[in-house]
């Protein structure tokens, strides 16, 4: 993997959305999808494990919401870049 690529974590409870984002990112030479999560709890775990450059976060998900996940991630990594 090219280290200069922007590493992206995609968080959404809809698999079709995650697949669509993955397809779009495959065509980008400066970005790569490093992981995905289906809910806020997975997002927190994957973010800690993968340390992405940017996280694309759905706000409305079952279980832990995107807002709760953002707050948890930010408490662990204040400089996290998250797009909701």
Image: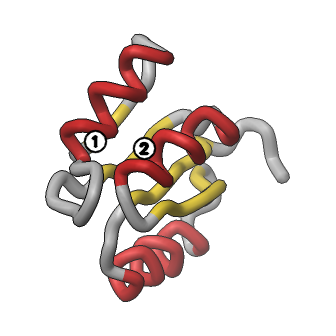
Q: Which residue carries the number 2 mark?
A: 55
Q: As rendered, which of 14 and 62 lies closer to the eye?
A: 62
Residue at the spot 57% in from the left edge and 43% down from the top edge: 45
**Please, which residue is most extreme toward the bottom here?**
16
Task: Say which quarter of the image contains residue 74.
Answer: top left
- Neighbours of disc 1 within 10 Å: few (<14), some (14-19), many (20+): few
Q: Is residue 24 above or below residue 45?
A: below
Q: Position of residue 48 (x, y in %)?
A: 61, 33
**Please, which residue is most extreme toward the left here?**
60
Residue 52's disc is none
Q: As rendered, which of 77 and 82 lies closer to the eye?
A: 77
Q: Which residue carries the number 1 mark?
A: 83
Q: Position of residue 24 (x, y in %)?
A: 46, 74
Q: Position of residue 37 (x, y in %)?
A: 48, 61
Q: For the residue labelled by badge 1, is the local secondary structure a helix, a strand or a loop?
A: strand
Q: Position of residue 21 (x, y in %)?
A: 42, 72
**Please, which residue is most extreme toward the right here?**
1
Q: Is residue 1 above or below residue 49?
A: below
Q: As rendered, which of 33 and 62 lies closer to the eye?
A: 62
Residue at the spot 65% in from the left edge and 55% down from the top edge: 34
Q: Is residue 33 above or below residue 83?
A: below
Would you say the residues marked 1 and 2 are in contact, meaning their CB atoms lie under 8 Å apart?
yes
Q: For the residue labelled by badge 2, is the local secondary structure a helix, a strand or a loop?
A: strand
Colouring style: secondary structure
Q: Is 65 displayed left or right of 11 in the figure?
A: left
Residue at the spot 48% in from the left edge and 40% down from the top edge: 44
Q: Is 21 displayed left or right of 23 in the figure?
A: left
Residue at the spot 72% in from the left edge and 37% down from the top edge: 4
- Neighbours of disc 2 within 10 Å: few (<14), some (14-19), many (20+): many
Q: CA distance from mark 1 to mark 2?
A: 6 Å
């Amino acid at each position: 993997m090219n280290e200069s690529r922007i590493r992206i974590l995609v968080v959404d409870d809809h698999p079709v959305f995650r697949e669509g984002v993955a397809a779009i990112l495959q065509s980008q030479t400066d970005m790569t999808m490093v992981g995905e999560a289906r809910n806020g709890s997975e997002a927190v775990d994957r973010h800690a494990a993968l340390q992405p450059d940017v996280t694309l976060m759905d706000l409305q998900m079952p279980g832990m919401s995107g807002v709760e996940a953002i707050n948890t991630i930010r408490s662990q990594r204040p400089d996290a870049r998250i797009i909701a």
